């Protein structure tokens, strides 16, 4: 029985790796071609003749080619293994990233909040919200978590602002 | 004569005033270095104004104490929080943080401390004994050798980082592209700046590392359910490793220290290349290379010994030639210049007592770091892990925001950290190694500068195969990158022929 379970887990892990190859390969290709378009269309002296100097476009072009090659390699490898593994997408795992997305949103709110209410209250509120978010699946009471989180945010502000003279 | 000099220096150095300054420097270095975003350079820059009114010798004692202890302390945030404070600590987090997750954070910090002290002492011995010889070898490095050593460093990182090599190469290429963002240093032409002024100066490595390692790791932790997070009580874990375990790490520490000193002595090569080289060397020599990255002491000892040996190595070109190997030694040269002294061969003739004092001050800093970090530092640092997970998560994310801002007091660095936090999180989800990206970003500008300089001077790319050092390094890099691919293609073809 455990052997069957192990085999099932191995197959699932392989399916995941195939999808990872395909997704990361496609992303590399999109990034390489997107940046190549930006790079080649950039105004200015990017493609001038610089004499003996190979110029500012030299290394980026090599790197974009390398990225495209690596992306193509990943897509090819994923494609070759795709039929064998019958790879599937897992919708449930996509939705499991909501706490991370919310945390990124809270961090992005720091700079606008700092502009309107100042750095210390902004860090207090963001640390409080992040602590509540991090403790959402636990049993701790959220008001206490929020207050302690806010205090830790304020303490870090004080350390950098007063201790290290960082103009936050 | 030598005896008189040494006794005079000893009596000058071992005074309450000098030892007190060294103690203050070590404590501040341990505090600053452990904070993400506060690099050794920043710690030295903060301390610089305090040296204005001092004599040269006390000023150097204070600065060297801050320098050495902050280099060690960079490993603390890497081990505890998975945030490398400096590029030199980026490899330490692979095994150090894995050990911390197993409840062995204090032991990982102890290994890091012992390796740092060992590396520091080996670097110091080589500095005192071989400085002029090593400096001579380091000066033989021209632009082809620099470009080759950077390529070698990147190949080593792609090899040493856990995960798939092809994905590692893709990550390395993205990292190198990030390294060329901004205005080109030769022609002043902007690249990949998307029309923004903020990106014209390039992307700073510290906010990038804070995002890639710190923010991404916490975001990944947030998406895990409570059952997935294994929590081992830290209080039950031992701090100091057994003597027998330590003895088995001595050859690793010795090899890594020698590597660290020699690479540290190459101007601008930096600790990032040294730690990658030391880690890859140990992985290559190990009978169980698959265990690297899973939380083994050797994975902490190798990079930490190399990282701290770099301190002695970095002082070699500074003392003997007056060349700053990195931004930290540039600040130290600034201290000497402030006091009307120019480091270089002339310093050995005009101020031999000061040279010996500097050597002595570094040794005192190493010993004091061992004592202070061992007796006070590690017990205090380990208390961080007693903080409830939810509060630690919030504090780490806020620390990442403030740390990213503190590097240059620039708002754009906060956005960079958040952006690369999201990128690092995506990499974790897609099982792409993050380390090659970070190293690519560090080494990209160095690679481009030396590659272009080589082509301007020699016109031909064949020069890499004509000079012995660059030939060896390029050949090794190609072997590291291509051999695993060739082996997997051959085994695939063999399987196919067997099946048919």
Image (cartoon, coloured by chain):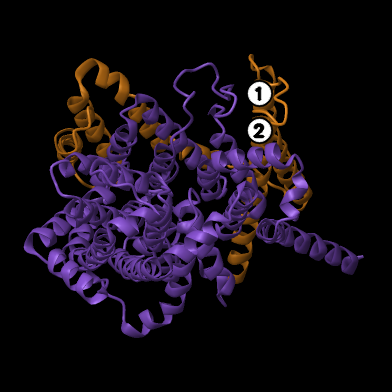
Chain colours: A orange, B purple
Counting from the top left corner in percent of width and height, residue B24 is at 14, 54
Q: Earlier in the sequence, mark 2 or mark 1?
A: 1
Graded by Cα atoms within 10 Å as few (under 14), some (14 to 19) or many (20 or more), the crowding at tag 1 reads many
* Residue B89 makes an appearance in the image: no
Q: Quadrant of residue B100?
A: bottom left
Instruction: Residue under label 1, please give it.
Output: A39
What SS does tag 1 mark? helix
Q: Tell which subunit mark 2 falls on.
A: A
User: Pointers 2 and 1 in contact (CB under 8 A)?
Assistant: yes
Graded by Cα atoms within 10 Å as few (under 14), some (14 to 19) or many (20 or more), the crowding at tag 2 reads many
Counting from the top left corner in percent of width and height, residue A62 is at 71, 37
For the residues beneath circles 2 and 1, the answer to whether they share a chain is yes
Write the residue at 53% across / 16% down: B195
Q: Which mark is residue B42?
A: none
Q: Is residue B197 left or right of residue B16?
A: right
In front of the other: B43 or A101: B43
Q: As displayed, is residue B191 above or below residue B230?
A: above
Q: Tell which subunit mark 1 falls on.
A: A
Counting from the top left corner in percent of width and height, residue B405 is at 32, 32
Write the residue at 48% across / 50% down: B267
Q: As displayed, is residue B450 above or below residue A52?
A: below
Q: Quadrant of residue B25?
A: bottom left
Q: Is residue B25 left or right of residue B200?
A: left
Q: Which mark is residue A60?
A: 2
Q: How many marks?
A: 2
Q: CA distance from mark 2 to mark 1?
A: 8 Å
Seen as rendered, the residue at the extreme right is: B500
Write the residue at 51% across / 66% down: B292
In front of the other: B164 or B4: B4
Q: Quadrant of residue A3?
A: bottom right
Query: Which quadrant would the C terminus of chain B be assigned to in this image?
Result: bottom right
């Amino acid at each position: 029985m455990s052997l069957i379970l192990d085999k099932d887990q191995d197959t699932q892990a392989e399916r995941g790796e195939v999808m990872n190859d395909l997704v990361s390969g496609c992303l590399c290709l999109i990034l390489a071609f997107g940046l190549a378009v930006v790079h080649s269309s950039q105004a200015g002296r990017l493609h001038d003749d610089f004499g003996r100097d190979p110029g500012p476009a030299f290394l980026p072009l090599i790197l974009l080619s390398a990225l495209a090659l690596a992306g193509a390699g990943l897509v090819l490898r994923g494609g070759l293994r795709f039929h064998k593994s019958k790879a599937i997408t897992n919708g449930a795992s996509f939705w499991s990233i909501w706490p991370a997305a919310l945390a990124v949103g809270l961090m992005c709110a720091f700079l606008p909040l700092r502009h309107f209410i100042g750095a210390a209250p902004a860090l207090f509120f963001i640390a409080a919200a992040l602590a509540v978010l991090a403790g959402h699946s636990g049993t701790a009471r959220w008001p206490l978590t929020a207050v302690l989180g806010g205090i830790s945010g304020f303490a870090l502000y004080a350390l950098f602002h007063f201790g290290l003279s960082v103009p936050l | 004569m030598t005896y008189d000099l040494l006794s005079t220096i000893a009596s000058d150095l071992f005074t309450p005033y000098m030892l007190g300054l060294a103690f203050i420097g070590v404590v501040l270095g341990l505090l600053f270095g452990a904070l993400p975003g506060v690099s050794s350079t920043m710690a030295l820059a903060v301390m610089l104004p305090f040296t204005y009114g001092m004599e040269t010798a006390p000023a150097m004692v204070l600065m060297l104490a801050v320098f050495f202890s902050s280099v060690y302390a960079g490993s603390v945030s890497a081990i505890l929080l998975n945030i490398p404070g400096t590029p030199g600590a980026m490899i330490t987090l692979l095994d150090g943080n894995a050990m911390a997750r197993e409840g062995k954070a204090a032991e990982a910090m102890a290994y890091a401390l012992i390796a740092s002290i060992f590396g520091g002492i080996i670097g110091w011995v080589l500095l005192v004994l071989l400085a002029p010889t090593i400096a001579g070898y380091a000066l033989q490095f021209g632009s082809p050798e620099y470009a080759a050593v950077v390529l070698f460093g990147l190949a080593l990182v792609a090899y040493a980082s856990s995960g798939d090599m092809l994905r590692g190469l893709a990550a390395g290429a993205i990292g190198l592209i990030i390294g060329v963002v901004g205005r080109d240093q030769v022609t002043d032409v902007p690249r990949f700046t998307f029309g923004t002024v903020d990106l014209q100066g390039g992307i700073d490595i510290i906010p990038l590392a804070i995002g890639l390692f710190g923010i991404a790791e916490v975001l990944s932790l947030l998406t895990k359910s409570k059952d997935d997070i294994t929590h081992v009580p830290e209080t039950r874990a031992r701090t100091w490793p057994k003597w027998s375990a330590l003895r088995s790490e001595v050859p690793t520490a010795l090899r890594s220290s020698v590597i660290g000193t020699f690479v540290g002595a190459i101007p601008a090569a930096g600790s990032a290349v040294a730690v990658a080289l030391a880690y890859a060397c140990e992985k290559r020599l190990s009978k169980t290379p698959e265990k690297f990255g899973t939380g083994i002491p050797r994975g902490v000892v190798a990079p930490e010994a190399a990282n701290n040996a770099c301190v002695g190595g970095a002082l070699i070109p500074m003392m003997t030639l007056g060349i700053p190997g990195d931004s930290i030694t540039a600040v130290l040269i600034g201290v000497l210049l402030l006091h009307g002294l120019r480091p270089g061969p002339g310093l050995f003739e005009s101020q031999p007592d000061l040279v010996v004092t500097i050597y002595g001050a570094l040794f005192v800093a190493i010993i004091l770091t061992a004592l202070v970090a061992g007796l006070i530092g590690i017990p205090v640092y380990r208390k961080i892990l007693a903080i409830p997970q939810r509060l630690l998560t919030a504090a780490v994310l806020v620390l990442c925001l403030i740390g990213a801002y503190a590097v240059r007091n620039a708002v754009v660095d906060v956005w960079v950290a958040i952006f690369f936090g999201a990128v690092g999180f995506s990499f974790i989800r897609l099982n792409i190694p993050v380390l090659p990206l970070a190293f690519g970003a560090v080494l990209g500008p160095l690679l481009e500068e030396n590659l272009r300089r080589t082509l301007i001077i020699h016109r031909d790319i064949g020069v890499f195969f004509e000079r012995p050092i660059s030939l060896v390094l390029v050949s090794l890099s190609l072997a590291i990158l291509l051999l695993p691919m060739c082996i997997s293609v051959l085994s695939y073809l063999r399987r196919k022929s067997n099946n048919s």
